Amino acid sequence: MTLFALGLNHTTAPLPVRERVVFHVGRLYDALGELTRGRQVAEAAILSTCNRTELYLSAEQAQEAAAWLAQSHQLQPEELRPYLYLHPY
């Protein structure tokens, strides 16, 4: 497994996109369960502020998490892909 940081921020995405990818506090617990259930993501943490949304995850690959991030906010993966960054550690 590899540790990844996957997300978008004020330098990679315009405000209308960032506003669509916010995780509100009441949704975080359920979102973490969705992200790790039945996917190739072993562990995860979500950081969501007004300037960025980031997923920190332990996984073999991050593509499935990127697709989940888009779908969980009613976006197509292609709509979100240009604004995402991925940093393996």
Image: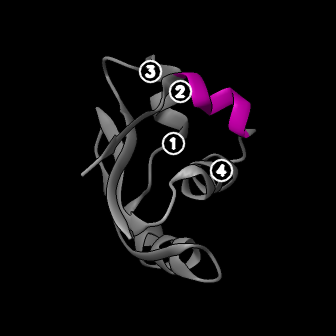
Residue 15 in which image quadrant: top left
Crowd class of label 2 (few under 14; some 14 to 19; many from 20; radius 10 Å) = some
Q: Are marks 1 and 2 in contact (CB under 8 Å)?
A: yes
Crowd class of label 3 (few under 14; some 14 to 19; many from 20; radius 10 Å) = some
Mark 4 or 1: the one toward you? 4
Residue 8 in which image quadrant: top left
| In the depicted structure, whether residue 42 falls above or below residue 4 | below
Residue type for callout 2: Val
Mark 4 or 2: the one toward you? 4
Task: Compare marks 4 and 2 and give the one earlier in the sequence.
Answer: 2
**SS of the residue under disc 1:** loop
Q: Which mark is residue 67?
A: 4
Which residue is depicted at the point 65% across and 82% down?
38
| In the depicted structure, whether residue 46 falls above or below residue 50 | below
Q: Are marks 3 and 1 in contact (CB under 8 Å)?
A: yes
Predominant SS along the magenta part: helix
Residue type for callout 4: Ala
Crowd class of label 1 (few under 14; some 14 to 19; many from 20; radius 10 Å) = many
Q: What residue would you read off at disc 2? A: 17
